[in-house]
Each structure stands twice: as C-alpha cells, then as structure tokens.
C-alpha cells in the first residue's frame, strides 16, 4: 500500500516538473519573440502528456 502511494506521489512530482519545464520554455520563447511551436516546445509538451498518463485527472 505504501509503495503505491509513493509511486503516485512520484508520478505527480514528475508531471509537475514536466509542466514547469514546458511553461519556463514557453516564457523564454515568447520573450525571445518566437511565436511558433519549436522542436523544444514539442518535446516538452510530449513529456507533459506522457507524465499525465500516470497521474489521475483530479491530481493534475
């Protein structure tokens, strides 16, 4: 039981980390005048979506 909670907690942490990286990148690209989706943005966005698969909707 405790291992499962830890796993869920790890998944939430991974999701939050991926989301923060995506948002940090978005702010930097907007500040640099980039208005289209870059490869970096796409990779970070894919990481967020992958991390979401392991987190229940109510914990996102």
Image: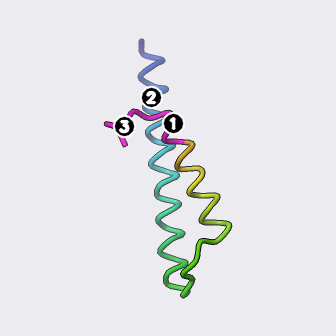
Res 12 quadrant in image: top left
Q: Is residue 39 above or below residue 29?
A: above
What numbered label is drawn on residue 8?
A: 2
Q: Residue at x 59, y 71 (%)?
A: 37
Give the Cα distance between marks 2 and 1.
11 Å
Q: Which residues are magenta?
A: 51-60
Check disc 1: other Cα within 10 Å, few if <14, some if 14-19, many if 20+. few
Farthest residue toward the right? 39
Q: Residue under circle 1?
A: 53
The front one of 51 and 16 is 51
Residue extending furthest top? 1
Q: Which residue is mark 3?
A: 57
Q: Secondary structure at mark 1?
A: loop
Q: Residue furthest front?
A: 36
Q: Earlier in the sequence, mark 2 or mark 1?
A: 2
Q: Residue at x 48, y 45 (%)?
A: 15
């Amino acid at each position: 039981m405790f291992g499962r909670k830890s796993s869920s907690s790890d998944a939430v942490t991974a999701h939050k980390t991926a989301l923060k990286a995506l948002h940090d990148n978005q702010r930097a690209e907007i500040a640099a005048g980039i208005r289209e989706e870059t490869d970096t943005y796409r990779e970070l966005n894919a990481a967020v979506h992958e991390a979401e698969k392991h987190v229940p909707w109510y914990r996102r």
